[in-house]
Amino acid sequence: MPSKKSKTKTSSRSSLWKHAPSCSEVGLGVLAKDLGRELRAGDRVLLEGPMGAGKSTFARALLEACGCELPPAGSPTFAIAHEYPSPRGTLIHIDVYRLESPSELESAGVESALWERSETIVLTEWLSKFTEEYQSLLSRYKQGRVWRVQLAFDPADESRRSVDVEQVRL
């Protein structure tokens, strides 16, 4: 079960919102639902971690917490992005794993979703592959809050995950 730690400062530009050192899949869902209740139009959520760490599982639980009806498929890797209506407005789930260059981000509409669609909540997986774009979003995005969710395998138990959720843009 995720820890309820809150608002522990990690730097002047970010704040650790939740920390779960050893989280089950059910715990991932609970943590995602907690974050889902906090999100509002304009927020961006950056999901980070190695392949298989639970980014798509976290995203699905977060989307469900926001009232989105989801198809049975998991990650949007093959479609790049899925847009969902919800009672809170539009949410976009983007997975850029297959993209290889910044020009592909632009042609796939990822940059437009991140920068121009201020009325949406956008969740991205693998954006950190694109260092310049990632850092730009962290440092210059002003239309809402940026949340970074870092998932990692628990070294003591590979079936569990360590999760840190931090609010980067305060």
Image (spheres, rainbow, N blue to C red):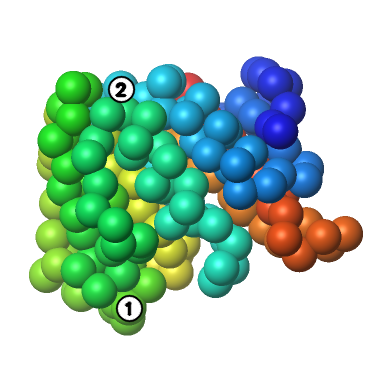
* Mark 1 secondary-structure assignment: loop
Indicate which disc residue 169 carries. none
Q: Residues within 10 Å of mark 2 (few under 14, many from 20)?
A: some
Name the amino acid type tagged 2. Arg
Name the amino acid type tagged 1. Arg
Indicate which disc residue 98 carries. 1
Query: Residue 33's x, y, as percent?
Result: 47, 30
Q: Which badge, 1 or 2, comes first in the chain's sequence?
A: 2
- Residue drawn at x 27%, y 29% is 67
* Residue on which disc 2 sits: 40
Q: Which residue is more in the foreground, 77 or 126?
A: 77
Query: Residue 79's x, y, as percent?
Result: 20, 69
- Residue drawn at x 61%, y 26% is 17
Q: Give the CA separation, mark 1 to mark 2.
A: 28 Å
- 152 on left or right of 44: right
Instruction: Locate residue 131: give its quadrant.
Output: bottom left
Query: Residue 87's x, y, as percent?
Result: 18, 22
Residue 142 shows up from this direction: no
- 4 on left or right of 30: right
Query: Residue 76's x, y, as percent?
Result: 28, 63
* Mark 2 secondary-structure assignment: loop
Q: Residues within 10 Å of mark 1 (few under 14, many from 20)?
A: few
- Residue drawn at x 29%, y 76% is 99
